[in-house]
Image (cartoon, rainbow, N blue to C red):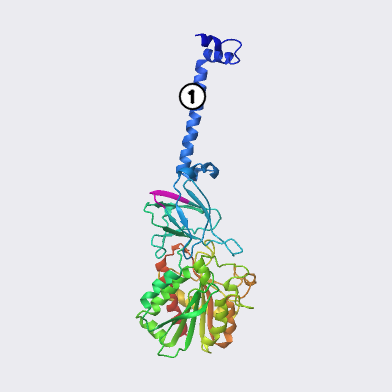
Amino acid sequence: MLVSNKIENDNNPYAHILKTMKSNKPFYLIFFATVLAVFVSQNLLGQNELKNPLRVRNTDKLNFANVAAQIPVISTAFPGGNVVIEKILGDTVFFKPDLRDTKSEWFYWCFSVKNNTNKKWFFKATKPNVLTNLGASYSTDGGFNWNWIDKEDHIGSDLFSFNFSGNGEPILFSMGMAYTQKNFDRFMLKYSDSKYLRKSVLTTTRAGRDVEKLLISNFEHEPKVRVLFTARAHAGEMMSNYIIEGMIEALLSENTSMKKLLENVEIMILPFLDKDGVEQGDQGKNRSPRDHNRDYSGVSIYQSTKTIREEIPNWIDGLPWIGIDLHNPGIKGEHNEWVYFVGNENMRVSEAQEKFVNILITSQKGPLEINSKTGFLAYGTAWNKGSNYEQGASFSKWASNFLDTGLMMTTTLEFPFALNNDQIVTQENARLFGQDLIFAISEYIETF
């Protein structure tokens, strides 16, 4: 009681506050209840943000979660690995492609994630146009078999999620179905004893890697025509290798048409022009000072293109020949989500290209369709203009110089990463398209 009297003494500066509280008890009860409600709601919101980072407008709010969250192990320490991890906040990994010596924004990335808890993680691209319109692809067996993420996990144009089982096994993620030397070596094992196949080395890269050269033919017969396929001039364009697998499957099958083709035709396949870029996980496209597919004029700066320019004329040896360069376009959008061939500025070459495209359209049997509306991009259309070749000549431009010395046809194929006019692209139907391609080549040659 003495204490109370002392507190309420007029000399106490807080005495008037206590007197007011006593006389207005209902008001202050309501005041404190309101403060408590706000505090609880803010804490609940914070917990909700941690569980669902998509609701966070300001990602800095999640900094406190770094301590509590079990961070997954993310790696690019494998062939083809590429990513820059900018930060991990809450349940979200923020990433972008590693451009390295590519001069413009580009979209190739591939990384592995190990997670020891049964948990959903979100992956947010911090640059636009690095996910396909199917989102990302993933592999659970080290990159041999790939699937597109489930539709519900493709949350937005720059965001996807994945539910980890927690077994600690690495899951590979990529913008496409990554393909490197190990994929090629495994595929080629089943043909190691084929008498129609000869494998050798075209050249050696700056880093000392072999650039493979495959010759496929019935070597008991002298060829009357030669056909050259090149791929991976741009390191990140992996879908071309699945096309090559399909062509090899057809060529080395027991199919009568293919056996007849190999009696008259010798086919050379160069599956990795930019072998260093493929294994290092580079973009390859728009390299500084120029990429492999702008290295066919002047003095070549890459050993693979230099060797092609020096040795292919000797290999052709005056015979009729065809040269096709396999590519993949941009990641999505117009001219990037359908199969098409790139027209040459030389009208005679262009006419030969259109003839071949029409044969492919009418003869194709696989599920991925090419049509007359989108299957040919004439020179002067969209990006296919002179300004696109200012850095140097492409393979097709170089090959067209042989028009009066045996060239039958040269072209560039652009094969999409994820969608072909709303058809979903997979490893298997890309291989089947490769089979369609080589059968169309056979039919085209028969027209001469």
Give how far across and how far down residue 221 sits, in percent: 41, 90
Give how far across and how far down residue 250 sits, in percent: 39, 77
**Count of numbered labels shown in the rendering:** 1
Give amino acid for label 1.
Answer: Ala
Q: Is residue 121 magenta?
A: yes
- Can you name the residue that lies furthest to the front here? 2
Q: Name the residue under label 1.
A: 33
Query: Circle 1: is it few (<14), some (14-19), or many (20+) Cα within 10 Å?
Result: few
Residue at the (44%, 72%) spot, across then down: 243
Image quadrant where residue 244 sits: bottom left
Residue in the foreground of this view, choosing between 134 and 49: 49
Image quadrant where residue 96 sits: bottom right
Give how far across and how far down residue 262 sits, in percent: 41, 85
- Can you name the residue that lies furthest to the left here? 254
* Figure check: 1 above or below 311: above
Give how far across and how far down residue 167 sits, in percent: 36, 53
* Figure check: 254 above or below 239: below
Left or right of 165? Residue 56 is: right
Q: What stretch is highlighted in magenta?
A: 115-122
| SS assignment at label 1 | helix
* Figure check: 110 above or below 447: above
Residue at the (57%, 73%) spot, across then down: 293
Q: Is there any visible trace of residue 365 in the rendered image?
A: no
Q: Does the magenta stretch include residue 146?
A: no
Image quadrant where residue 377 sits: bottom right
Q: Is there any visible trace of residue 248 in the rendered image?
A: yes
